[in-house]
Structure formats: structure tokens, C-alpha cells
Image (cartoon, helix red, strand yellow):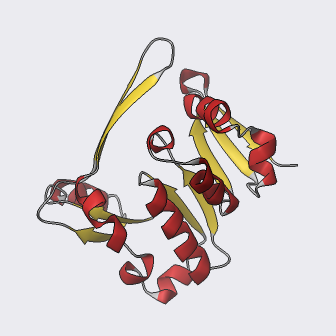
Amino acid sequence: CLVLSAVGKDFSSYETALKKMGVNLKVLRDEKDYTATFYAMTDTKGEQIGVFQGGAYNNNVSSLSIAKLLSLKEIQGLEYAIFAAGTAKSILKQIKELKKLNKKVKIVFDPGQMLAIDFTKEILEDCLKNSDLVILNDVECNFLHNHFGFDLRVIFSLGVTGLVETKGADGSVFHERV
């Protein structure tokens, strides 16, 4: 497992824990700011509200480059890459950068709460066109459909081959393009 991200001055305890679990870290460290944090709250109706503090990630997202943090050999050795927890523009930029350097890599796209905060229909569509698998919770699935008009038919027509929809205590559903 490899994690690539921008981190802040408070990352050392996370770094220690992740390394103990065998996670390979390739990070851009910003000693002037804190690591990005997201807080989510869900009410009894399943509606969510979240607060994202971008910190070091927001300050460094424009200079975060896969090619600068990984060797070409590492990049070409990747079979799967999960893109999550970032700004819409940075996720799209990094997906395209990786696909340019490794045409065989399978892209997993998990926009999470940023879906409702930062994505335009155009950027979302471009991310979906460049993804193989999408991961969303049930609230995000409903938002994708109600706000952007993207149902499973539309998502699969863009080239996505599978969608994992998590449903909290009710488990998950895997939707597959046939």
C-alpha cells in the first residue's frame, strides 16, 4: 500500500502509525501548516453535513505531482490507484497525470464529501470518464443523481465498470456494468 499526499507539521504520529502498518508514504511535507482534516455529521434521516479544513493539502495541491513523488518505475508498477479526499481539480489533475504515465492502471474514484462541496458537473464527468471503479455512500449516490443527474446508466456510459454503494449498517451493494 502506498499513500501519496501533502501533509502538515502534525503528521509525525500518523506517519509512525502508518509505517508500523507497512504503508509506504510518499508525502510532500509542509511544516508551516496542519494536515487536512474532515469532520462529518449524519442525522437520523441520513443527511450529512461536513467541515473540511484543507491545511497543508490546500496550500500545496497545485504543486503535488505524482511524477515528482514517485519514480517512473514505481508509477508503472501501480496496478490500482485510489483517488479520494482532495479538491475536484486536484483529483482530476492527478488522475490524468497518472493515466498518462501508466496506461494500464485501474483508477478507483472516491470523491466522498467533496462531491457536494467542490465538484462541477464538468469536472465530475471528466473524473468518471477516467475511472474504472467509483465508491460512494448512499447519500453521495443520491446527491450524484439528484444534483448532477448521473444515474447508473449515465455513470456506466462514461466508461465506469463498477460502482460500490455503501449503505451504513445495511452493508454495501456492488453495481456492475454489463
- Horizontal arrangement in the rendering, residue 53 relative to residue 33 (left or right): right
Q: Nearer the viewer, residue 8 or 117?
A: 117
Query: Can you give x and y, in whole percent of width and height, for residue 114 in the image?
Result: 45, 44
Query: Can you give x and y, in whole percent of width and height, for residue 28 in the image?
Result: 27, 71
Specify whether residue 25 is in view: no
Query: Can you give x and y, in whole percent of width and height, for residue 174 in the image?
Result: 71, 40
- Horizontal arrangement in the rendering, residue 3 relative to residue 105 (left or right): left
Q: Residue at x 42, y 51 (%)?
A: 85
Q: Which residue is drawn at 21% across and 59% down?
A: 16
Q: Examine the image and state in which quarter residue 151 appears.
A: top right
Q: Residue furthest right?
A: 178
Quadrant in which the N terminus is drawn: bottom left
Q: Nearer the viewer, residue 52 or 81?
A: 52
- Horizontal arrangement in the rendering, residue 25 relative to residue 158 (left or right): left
Tally the numbered discs.
0
Q: Examine the image and state in which quarter residue 166 appears.
A: top right
Query: Can you give x and y, in whole percent of width and height, for residue 162 in the image?
Result: 73, 49
Q: Against 70, is 38 above or below?
A: above
Q: Which residue is drawn at 53% across and 76% down?
A: 97
Q: Which residue is drawn at 61% across and 22% down?
A: 170
Q: Against 41, is 37 above or below?
A: below
Q: Against 100, is 11 above or below?
A: above
Specify whether residue 131 is in view: yes
Q: Residue furthest top?
A: 44
